[in-house]
Amino acid sequence: MDSVRLANEALKLPAGERAQLIDALWRSLDPADQPSIDQSWLAESRDRLCAHREGKLKAMDGEEALRAIEDGLRQ
């Protein structure tokens, strides 16, 4: 299966399954770097939570965020 066809099929998956697929693909790129990547995401998550609590960042639910990403990919 070519990558374009695979991507089109993946986009048909429910949001949770797409997120799991993204995570699996990301982790497959270089597993040795994973602890560093995890620490970076933890710091980013804390920064975003703090910004949200301070009213500096608007919350968006996961489904809405994934739709926005899909729309951007299709353009």
Image (cartoon, grey):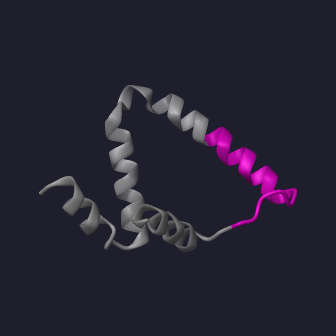
Q: Quadrant of residue 32?
A: top left
- Classify 33 as above or below 57: above
The answer to if 49 sits in the magenta stretch is yes
The answer to if 12 sits in the magenta stretch is no
Q: Residue at x 15, y 55 (%)?
A: 2
The secondary structure making up most of the magenta span is: helix
Q: Residue at x 40, y 66 (%)?
A: 74
- Classify 22 as above or below 33: below
- Of all residues, the one furthest to the front in this rendering is 75
- Classify 45 as above or below 73: above
Please state, as top left, top right, bottom left or bottom right, where the C terminus lies in the image. Answer: bottom left
Residue 3: x and y in percent read: 21, 54
Residue 68: x and y in percent read: 53, 68
Q: Residue at x 27, y 66 (%)?
A: 8
Please state, as top left, top right, bottom left or bottom right, where the N terminus lies in the image. Answer: bottom left
- On the rendered structure, is 1 left or right of 64? left
- On the rendered structure, is 14 left or right of 63? left
Residue 15: x and y in percent read: 43, 70
Residue numbers of the magenta segment: 42-59
Q: Quadrant of residue 19?
A: bottom left
**Observer-nearest residue: 73 or 6?**
73
